[in-house]
Image (cartoon, rainbow, N blue to C red):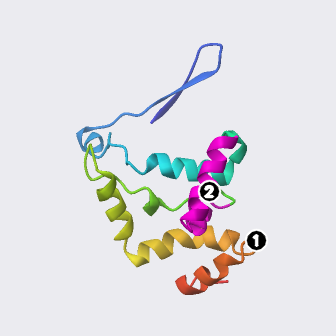
Amino acid sequence: MAFENRGEGGLTVIRINLGALGLGGVRFAVSPLDPAKDLLFALGRTPNALSAQWRARTTKALSQGRLGLLAVVAGGGPRGYAPDFLRPEPQGFQTSLDAALHQVATTPPEQIRYELTPTIRDRRRTLPELRHVSRQLGVPA
């Protein structure tokens, strides 16, 4: 990987040199869950970046669906981390929404525990509803 400074505008170009093996590991697919995850992240981290209409619609949907915990977890902790299992790596170029939701639903419990621990540990003091989840997952105090 090389960093180059180009021009007077301070534009930085990042050049990544990949061999065949490295290029073979690059994915160009996008998860169908990305827009929902991005919306929850924005709602949790920068709610004013969303229009009042989007905030209201999202909050209403989360409330009606009793998905407050999902919003808290997907919104990222104080350090901005949101669990990776909520945005699984697509299995193919055009992964269906059902397939992506199946990936989330079948995430191994060990992975869920590992990825939720930092988010819950950082926020459970300010969000009492996370204390129960914290105990269930065995997150250390």
Q: Residue drawn 55% across and 86% down?
A: 136
Q: Does the magenta stretch include residue 110?
A: no
On the question of residue 108 being in view, the answer is yes
Q: Which label is found at residue 78?
A: none
The image position of residue 69, as x and y in percent, is 59, 69
Q: Find numbered disc 1 in the image and state the secondary structure of the residue it sits on.
A: loop
Q: Earlier in the sequence, mark 2 or mark 1?
A: 2
Q: Residue drawn 37% across and 69% down?
A: 105
Q: Find numbered disc 2 in the image and state the secondary structure of the residue it sits on.
A: helix
Give 92 or 32, whichever is nearer the viewer. Answer: 32
Q: Which label is found at residue 126?
A: 1
Give 30 or 114, whichever is nearer the viewer. Answer: 30
Rendering quarter of residue 87: bottom left
Q: Residue drawn 32% across and 64% down?
A: 102
Q: What stretch is highlighted in magenta?
A: 52-77
Give 44 or 77, whichever is nearer the viewer. Answer: 44
- Look at mark 2 in the image and give the residue it sits on: 60
Q: Is residue 12 above or below residue 68?
A: above
The image position of residue 32, as x and y in percent, is 38, 48
The image position of residue 119, as x and y in percent, is 61, 67
Marks 2, 1: nearer the viewer: 2
